[in-house]
Image: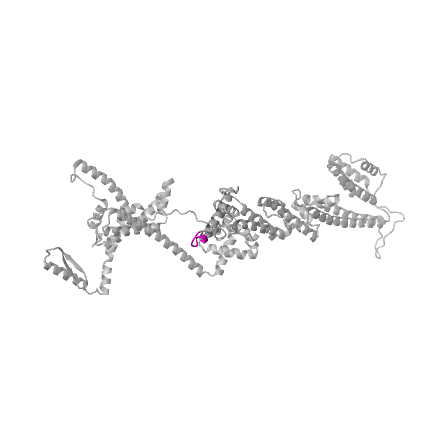
Amino acid sequence: MPITAELHDGTRLEFPDGTDPAVIQRTVKNVMGAKTEAPKPAVVGLGETIRDIPRQVGLTARAGVRALATIPAMGADAVAGIYNTAANALVGDGNGYRFPPQMQALDNALTQVGLPAPRNATERVAGQGAEMMAGAGGLAKGAEVLARGATGVGRNVLQMMAANPVTQIAGGTGAGVAGGSVRESGGSPLEEFGASLAGGVGAGMAANKLAGIAESGTRAVRNLMTPRTEQIRNADQTITLTLQRAGIDWAAVPDNIKAALRGEVADALSSGQPLSQDALRRLVAFRRTGTTPTVGQLTQDPGQITREMNLAKTGANSTDPVLQRLPGLQNENASRLLAQLDGMGADPMRAPSGMVAGQRAIDRLGSNLTTAQNEVDRLYTLARDSSGRSVQLDGATAMRTANENLRRDLVGKLGGEVDDIMNRITSGETPLTVDYQQQLSKMLYRKIRGAGDNGDLRHGLGLLRQAIDNAEPVAAQPVAGARLLTGPPGAPVANAGDEAIQAFRTARTAHRELRARIESNPALRAVDEGVEPDKFVQRYLIGDGATAADVRALVSELDPQTLGVLRSTLAKNLRDAATTSTDDVVKFSNTAYRKTFRNLEAKLPSFFNADEIDQLRAIGDAAKYMQAQPVGSAVNNSNSGALVLGRGLDLLDRLSKFAPLGAKDVIQGKLQGVQQTRVLDPRNALMQLAAPVKRPVPVNPLLAAAVATPVEGRENKRGN
């Protein structure tokens, strides 16, 4: 039976039966002396710590060398083990040379060169942690170097091993400390290996978590220390540069829209993530149009769009109003786009029809022509009155010019009546006076209008009319009985014929200017020649045949009221394209709208200012982003699956009413919130998603195995 000695502090010492009493007394005295030893003075403790520095440096050096040799030693031991086993089988144990454990040989060598060895359990565990820390760092760096020349799966594995070296080092340290502690407490190799893995994974995860907390804390402190005004200013600079690259002038964006965007971008930047330029550019279009985007519409990510669109269809097939939020949002956004167009004059209840707009424009142009023609007639009247008779024109030369132009353009006869008139003027049988010139000009104008689709006849009559209009007056001769003009005292007396010629030239200049004005303006020329109201808008405003220059010429002839009518007609044309002329149903075809906008874009500046044109463009862009289904998306456009899911959600909703203990609210909350999580927050789109990070191995299994590999035997597992 063992002998037990109990000290005054409760400590119990056990001795084998038969132990010499003197030995027991000496042991008890030594133990009690150690317990009652006075504490060392602080200076003595400090001195011992300083003296121990070289030893700690040596231990660190030993741990570093062992760390570099651990993995290679494991490989060498595997080869050596094969040799030793074969040698034992061939020549028997104890005969011949056997390879010792490589790490044991290394330890002996390090001791021989003077490096200190651990002398207790604490130093052994600390050394084990230092070894694994250095080994993990070395392995991560080595894997990074090897990954540069590797390919395929091997490259991916090496990249994972090299990723996040801080986590790797923390994991290695945790593996070493945990495995070493289990070894010192007498654990088996399997227990050591498990503890190493657990310690490495735990330390790696803790390091990652702490890094995340530190990053979040740093970001929070930075945001806290940065005034909101400075955050907004930084956001404004970022927005300006981002939109410049996208071809958008930030200065031209309305102030009320800028304010909202600045706040959203500032919040996104505070996350520390880079800003998505594409998402910001799209967000501008949504904010300009007062519509609400989803994350998928801003990112145009095919997977996100698939989930959002299918969820919207599922909600639309459900009877739960909350689940119908996304389809309701789609309808609301389309309504807002149409309201934007209505605000620019496209309201189908107020915008004039094409016929009404055409008649209004024709009336205005006709009034302009009448006014201008009346002025020309007045000047010609003055020319006639100035001489007391009509001025005679050089009809023969005018007819010769007309015939030459007709032959040049390969135009044949102009008709019996017209040909007869030309012959009589050429022969001098019928003098070409100013009065007769005006009669012929009006007669030819009527014939041009009546020529219809006969282009050659219309062209020929126009050439004749031009020659007659350009006819020069015959040189003036004194005319018996002509009225003489008397000027100021001492001024020469002018012949009445000269005055009549000068008055005629003034009238003819006004007539030429009017004809040039008409010929340069297709819409005015059409009114001069006659055009139907229902065809006017299509031909001379919105049709492809009407160029931007033609439209500018048309606008120059219009008063503000008529200009407003045609502006509304253009806006309604855009709206009709978006809705396929379905006024009483909310729908918006972005493809048809944007095509019509592109066709009209060059003409719009004649009716809309720059901000309004940007608004019209943003309407098309917002609609495009709302309805886009990029390559890779898998939207269930057939609606079959959404119908089934919608009915299923209704069934779950009904069944949830019978769930006990508040489970009803949980089920309904999940059903109603599934399509709203993160979908409607623009910040989730503005924060550019970082490239997928290759997750590091928290602890390399080789390091864990190295911890559990015996080096100096396992006979002394409990440290002293």
Q: Quadrant of the C terminus?
A: bottom left
Q: Locate residue 388 relative to residue 714 in the image: left or right.
A: right
The answer to whether one can see residue 221 in this image is yes
Q: Residue drawn 23% across and 62% down?
A: 47
Q: x, y (%) of residue 231? A: 48, 58
Quarter of the image for residue 57 reads bottom left
Render colour scheme: one colour
Q: Nearer the viewer, residue 177 or 447?
A: 177
Span highlighted in magenta in the image: 659-665
Q: Nearer the viewer, residue 60 or 74?
A: 74
Q: Locate residue 475 relative to residue 707 in the image: left or right.
A: right
Q: x, y (%) of residue 707? A: 27, 48
Q: Residue furthest right?
A: 481
Q: Locate residue 674 relative to residue 591 in the image: left or right.
A: left
Quarter of the image for residue 403 reads top right
The answer to whether one can see residue 247 in this image is no
Q: x, y (%) of residue 226? A: 45, 60
Q: Residue furthest front?
A: 658
Q: Quadrant of the N terminus?
A: bottom left
Q: x, y (%) of residue 150? A: 37, 41
Q: Nearer the viewer, residue 629 or 697?
A: 629
